[in-house]
Image: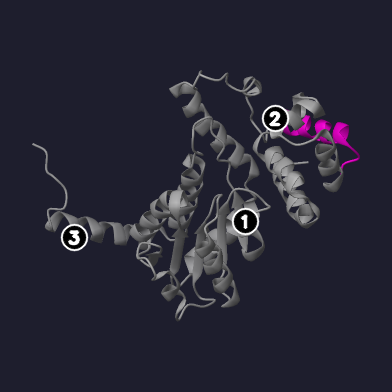
């Protein structure tokens, strides 16, 4: 089983999972190496649920029990599709011993690797097709999710010039839906804790027939069921906040693929942009 098919299995089983079961499923996606090399008791302690909850979650996902889930996790970890450092399975940091800079940066590297292993090529093709054909591209991410959303929106606006980055003006978010429809596309970047306004926007956009591309954390995310294509991005970090490097990397890659669909048009736009910026002395000239 590939990691992307495991994500699909979790998505399909999401409605039948308890809150504890959803925590188990999320941890399975974030750290399959824990399930591959730790006992059911150790996994339960790490997730802070009961062993019975871990076993019930395994069964809800279609496995006979924890042993079968563990065997599947081992195959995922050892496969070429999921490059994983075995040293990543290590005890939690001791109190008073914060992670090093190298460890935190390694979290970013691991998040990108994990995200790469989850990407469904079909969803990539669909996302690129929607973005290329869209009349307008609406990009939304709020709070910490605003960082990768703003990054993507600026890149896409530079390349195509039909992007609206939302959420900058308080109280004006839903105005962007006026006149929007199936010819447009909305890119939603949303990581826990999800903001209510982002979820409301996504629901209203879906009701209007606007195709949605969701960049989120899990198949259990409420945005997955609303989207035409979705990407589950790893964000676990040893630091005080999650890492969004993998989200930025994924979105940067998608933007690059969009540019390659019409390189002549993109090149013309970039050349015109350079002329305008030079004429306006936008950038400092270093002697």
Closest to the camera, between mark 3 and mark 2, is 2
Instruction: Give the class, few, some or many, for how many residues have Cα within 10 Å of label 1's Cα (few <14, many ≥20).
Output: some
Residue 15 position in % (x across, y down):
77, 57
Q: Is residue 236 left or right of residue 55?
A: left
Instruction: Please tell me which residue lies in front, 212 or 261.
Output: 212
Badge 2 density bin: few <14, some 14–19, many ≥20, Cα 10 Å: some
Kindly identify which numbered label has been placed on residue 276: 3
Q: Residue at x 62, y 56 (%)?
A: 123
Which residue is more in the foreground, 209 or 31? 31
Q: Is residue 225 above or below residue 232?
A: below
Above or below 159: residue 176: below
Residue at x-position 39% and y-position 66%: 164
Residue named by callout 1: 123
Number of marks in picture = 3
Task: Give the secondary structure at mark 2.
Answer: helix
Name the residue carrying label 2. Answer: 46
């Amino acid at each position: 089983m590939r990691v992307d098919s495991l994500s699909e299995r979790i998505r399909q089983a999401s409605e039948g999972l308890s809150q504890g079961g959803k925590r188990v499923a999320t941890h399975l996606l974030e750290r399959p190496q824990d399930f591959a090399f730790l006992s059911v008791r150790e996994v339960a302690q790490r997730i802070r649920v009961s062993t019975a909850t871990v076993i019930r979650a395994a069964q809800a996902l279609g496995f006979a029990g924890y042993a079968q889930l563990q065997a599947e996790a081992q195959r995922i970890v050892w496969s070429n599709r999921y490059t994983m450092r075995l040293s990543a399975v290590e005890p939690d940091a001791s109190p008073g011993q914060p992670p090093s800079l190298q460890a935190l940066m390694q979290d970013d590297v691991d998040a990108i690797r994990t995200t790469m292993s989850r990407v469904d090529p079909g969803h990539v093709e669909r996302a690129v097709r929607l973005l290329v054909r869209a009349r307008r591209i609406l990009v939304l991410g709020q709070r910490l999710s605003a960082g990768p959303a703003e990054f993507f929106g600026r890149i896409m606006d530079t390349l195509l010039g039909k992007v609206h980055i939302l959420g900058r003006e308080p109280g004006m978010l839903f105005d962007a839906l006026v006149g929007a429809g199936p010819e447009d596309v909305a890119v939603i970047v949303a990581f826990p804790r999800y903001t209510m306004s982002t979820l409301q926007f996504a629901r209203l956009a879906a009701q209007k027939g606007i195709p949605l591309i969701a960049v989120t954390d899990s198949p259990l995310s409420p945005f997955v069921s609303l989207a035409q294509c979705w990407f589950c991005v790893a964000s676990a970090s040893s630091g005080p906040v999650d890492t969004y490097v993998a989200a930025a990397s994924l979105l940067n890659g998608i933007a690059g693929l969009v540019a390659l669909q019409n390189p002549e048009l993109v090149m013309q736009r970039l050349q015109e942009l350079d002329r305008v910026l030079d004429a306006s002395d936008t950038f400092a000239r270093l002697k």
